[in-house]
């Protein structure tokens, strides 16, 4: 009977340790889940900023192309007037 009591005490201690480990692991999982949520939020915000920056770059790129076309037209008009003046 004494051996049974000792075995039950050892089993009780082992179960208590397992419970404590389970609680610690649960707390750790909660912490990591929170960190993952925060990281996901940061990635989403960064992605939104990147998309906004990309749209701005696309806009600037279109404006540069438009300005390049305008410069070419102005140069061609200038060349036209120079040729017109030379052949008069």
Image (tube, rainbow, N blue to C red):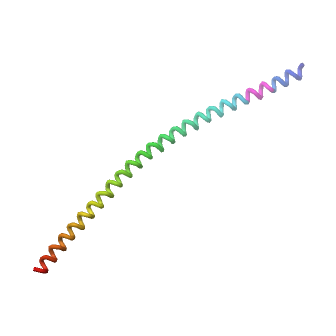
View extreme (bottom): residue:
87
Q: Position of residue 67 (x, y in %)?
A: 26, 61
Q: Position of residue 55 (x, y in %)?
A: 36, 51
- Quarter location, residue 14: top right
Q: Going by the image, does 4 lie left or right of 27?
A: right
Magenta highlight range? 11-17
Foreground of the two, 17 or 40:
40
Whether residue 23 is in magenta: the answer is no
Foreground of the two, 52 or 87:
87
- Quarter location, residue 71: bottom left
Q: Quadrant of the N terminus?
A: top right
Q: Residue at x 13, y 76 (%)?
A: 84
Q: Position of residue 36 (x, y in %)?
A: 54, 40
Q: Residue at x 12, y 77 (%)?
A: 85
Q: Quadrant of the C terminus?
A: bottom left
Q: Position of residue 87 (x, y in %)?
A: 12, 80
View extreme (left): residue:
88
Q: Residue at x 50, y 41 (%)?
A: 40
Q: Going by the image, does 70 lie left or right of 11?
A: left
Q: Residue at x 59, y 33 (%)?
A: 30
* Vertical comparison of 11 with 67: above or below: above
């Amino acid at each position: 009977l004494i051996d049974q009591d000792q075995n039950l005490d050892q089993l009780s201690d082992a179960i208590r340790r397992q419970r404590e480990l389970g609680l610690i692991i649960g707390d750790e999982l909660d912490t990591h889940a929170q960190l993952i949520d925060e990281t996901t939020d940061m990635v989403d915000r960064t992605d939104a900023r990147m998309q906004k920056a990309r749209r701005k770059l696309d806009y600037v790129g279109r404006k540069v192309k438009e300005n390049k076309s305008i410069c070419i037209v102005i140069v061609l008009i200038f060349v036209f007037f120079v040729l017109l003046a030379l052949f008069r």
